């Protein structure tokens, strides 16, 4: 379980940068995994401050993304792992703090990106899912899977 936020301000989307499996940087929605016993609402507030430096107010639950994939074995695992991730996607607005980069965490940079330029960025699928949830506001809280 994880919680992420779509933060749009003045036509710009707040994203964090994280290395892909091959080490190439890619843009992600700010957010991340829940700690044991943590409420998802608290997770998204904590993760946004850790990754971007901003304090946020959660303004709504946009929906969720459920993804299942088999990860190849290797290293200590030795066998493939059937992974199922459930990611809650919130809408949030910045209420304070200053943009800064995370130190010693899962991301190395945070930045605002013009919404029109997001399709040209190297990004994970969840960025597109989050933007669709934000734009379309489906009553089911989910958008049809588009692969990957």
Image: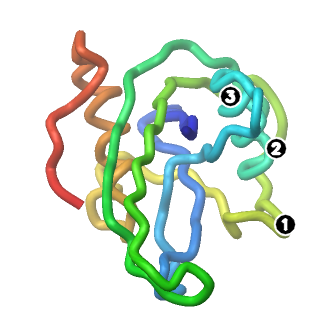
Structural crowding at the residue carrying mark 2, measured as other residues with C-alpha within 10 Å and reported as few (<14), some (14–19) or many (≥20): few
Q: Nearer the viewer, mark 3 or mark 1?
A: 1
Residue at 29% from the left image edge and 50% from the top image edge: 116
Structural crowding at the residue carrying mark 3, measured as other residues with C-alpha within 10 Å and reported as few (<14), some (14–19) or many (≥20): some
Q: Are marks 3 and 1 in contact (CB under 8 Å)?
A: no
Image check: 118 left or right of 57? left
* Viewer-side residue, 72 vs 64: 72
Q: What residue did someone put label 2 on?
A: 98
* Real-space CA distance between mark 1 and mark 2, rounded to the nearest whole angstrom: 15 Å
- The location of residue 49, given as percent across then percent down, is 78, 41
- The location of residue 138, given as percent across then percent down, is 22, 17
Residue at 68% from the left image edge and 19% from the top image edge: 57
Image check: 143 left or right of 13? left
- The location of residue 126, given as percent across then percent down, is 37, 49
Structural crowding at the residue carrying mark 1, measured as other residues with C-alpha within 10 Å and reported as few (<14), some (14–19) or many (≥20): few
Q: What residue did someone put label 3 on?
A: 94
- The location of residue 44, given as percent across then percent down, is 66, 32
Helix, strand or loop under label 3: strand
The earlier-in-sequence mark between 3 and 1 is 3
Helix, strand or loop under label 2: loop
Quarter of the image with the C terminus in it: bottom left
* Real-space CA distance between mark 3 and mark 1, rounded to the nearest whole angstrom: 20 Å
| Mark number, residue 36 | none
Image check: 85 left or right of 136? right
Q: Nearer the viewer, mark 1 or mark 2?
A: 1
Q: What residue did someone put label 1 on?
A: 103
Helix, strand or loop under label 1: loop
């Amino acid at each position: 379980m994880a919680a992420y936020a779509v933060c749009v301000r003045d036509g710009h989307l707040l994203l964090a940068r994280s290395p892909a499996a091959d080490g190439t940087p890619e843009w992600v929605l700010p957010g991340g995994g829940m700690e044991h016993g943590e409420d998802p609402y608290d997770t998204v507030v904590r993760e946004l401050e850790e990754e971007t430096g901003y304090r946020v107010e959660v303004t709504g639950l946009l929906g969720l993304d459920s993804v299942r994939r088999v990860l190849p074995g290797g290293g200590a695992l030795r066998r493939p792992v059937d992974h199922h991730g459930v990611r809650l996607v919130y809408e949030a607005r910045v209420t304070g703090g200053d943009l800064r980069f995370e130190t010693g965490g899962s991301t190395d940079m945070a930045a605002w990106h013009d919404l029109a330029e997001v399709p040209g960025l190297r990004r994970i699928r969840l960025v597109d899912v989050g933007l669709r949830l934000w734009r379309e506001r489906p009553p089911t809280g989910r958008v049809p899977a588009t692969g990957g």
